[in-house]
Amino acid sequence: MRNRNLTGIPFCPPQVPGKLQDQFIPLTSLDEMAGTDYDVIVVGTGAGGGAAIWRLCEQLRNTGKKIGVVEAGPILLQTHAGNLPTLRFNDYFLNPKISRHIGNLLPDLPGAREVIGLGGMNLFWGLASPRMFISEWLNYPIDRNELELYYNIAEQQMTVTKTKYPLSESFLTRLWEGGFPEATIIPRAENLEPAKYGPVVYFSSISFLGSAFMQRPFDLAINARAVQVLTDQGKVNGIKVMTPEKKAYELKAKNIIISANAFQTPRLLLSSGIKGRAIGHYLTIHSFLSSSFQVKQPQSAVGNSLQTVNLLIPQTEKETNQIQFGISERYKTLDNAAEYHASTWSFGKVESRYENRLFLDPSRRDSYGVPEIQVHFSFSEKDKSILAQLADRLNKAASVLGANKQPEICIALPGSDYHVMGTCRMGDDPSTSSTNRYGQIHGVSGLYIADNSVLPTTGAANPTLTTAALAIRTADYVSRQLD
């Protein structure tokens, strides 16, 4: 009776647990990492860092190469905040324990915030994933045809799709007939086919990390603040990190990929004594208009259920701006008529100028001893002209969509687009760029950048997709160097 039940069939053997872990992704202590010689260490786990980690694990899965990852913050969420219905976006995101209002330190960018934690700002991003307008590639040292491959890879991994609902065509037709033939559905990084692509709906860098770990293991330490890049005779050889208790560790690595964000990446380089005329300069954001209005009911609306329709009027040769619409049903009356509410997020291109810069303030240091940053930023006359054109374009589009009155438009505080970029931009000329075409810092072998800071510009397009595509390309290059 000990080994058989009443039917005479033996019991199944008890399940034996594998390696136990107390987090959704395995963690490694800094004590253990300090005793390992890594082939590559990635600093930061936002969109760029996550994309680089995933690609490194995919390309090096059948090798014995050692990959390490350090994240300055803790684990905040295990997925994009939008996948958790109990979280109201602003209530959670604006919590000072979650995101840091660095506008207090940067008066020229009063709307700027950053998230220090696993996944970074990508835990809360808006999912819009358009490609850059074609002419913007003239600002890059890369042939755009080469990036076609990496855009495709990034879009596939991030499940970027154009979701068409029954009423999408009705609203699109209004725009097309009203003088906006370029209007389309916003490509968004969301998975609406869970049976095909898995259970996660809204994509975040956490998905990059999970997919990476399924390819092969890597060492991940959280609450590990990078405070100094270690170099010797023009070559990187490691990174110095500190715990919240201020215990310091030196981690050895042949290659370092920094993906800390467009504020913290140049701050780390400058405070480490990394030389480069362009580091911290060419700080670029988007001008940002916000508005909302009510939309008349389309003829095809009766009887249709409407989830949010996401539309895009993209940048063109004449219009260096883009407008995103989110249109949803507000309520229905007893006679089945409906009122639709449109919210807009409109971005204008901002010039990349050397004088817009981030720099260290030696008189102010944080608790880790790293100098704080200050920013000098202003809009040029051309930036202001583009902003005025954007407002005109938005008013015309609202009228074409059937707005019941002219929308109330407000200018968001500079930096609240969260599209900061350019502070370590890529290029062929070390006097006007920080990295080469592969994201490697000029003059420092083995030191790479893979986040928004490497982007010279994205025109008026959201930067996340382009950042991910370039990070994947940089990871491919690093993998080839390791081979």
Image (cartoon, rainbow, N blue to C red):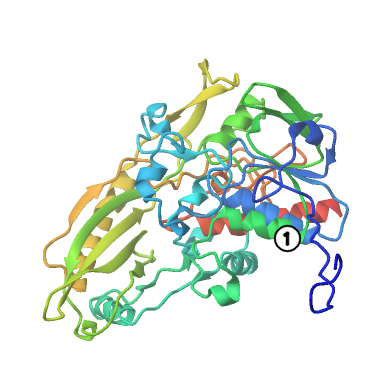
Q: Depth check: 323 or 70 in front?
A: 70
* Quadrant in the picture for residue 473: bottom right
328 vs 225: above or below: below
Q: Find disc 1 in the rendering and name its residue.
A: 214
- The mark tally for this picture is 1
Q: Neighbour class for label 1 at 10 Å: few (<14), some, many (≥20)?
A: few
146 vs 273: above or below: below
Residue 344 placed where, x, y %?
29, 59
Quadrant of the rendering where the N terminus is positioned: bottom right
Quadrant of the rendering where the C terminus is positioned: bottom right
394 vs 8: above or below: above
Q: Is residue 330 visible?
A: yes
Left or right: where 110 falls relative to 18: left
Instruction: Tell me which residue sits at (78%, 57%) in the image.
Output: 216
Q: Depth check: 49 or 379 in front?
A: 49
Q: Depth check: 330 or 394 in front?
A: 330
* Quadrant in the picture for residue 10: bottom right
Q: Is residue 234 visible?
A: no
Q: Residue furthest top?
A: 363
Residue 279 placed where, x, y %?
58, 35
SS label for mark 1: helix
Residue 340 placed where, x, y %?
21, 70
* Quadrant in the picture for residue 462: bottom left
Instruction: Tell me which residue sits at (60%, 18%) in the image.
Output: 369
Residue 474 placed where, x, y %?
69, 53
Q: Amino acid at mark 1?
A: Met
Left or right: where 343 falls relative to 440: left
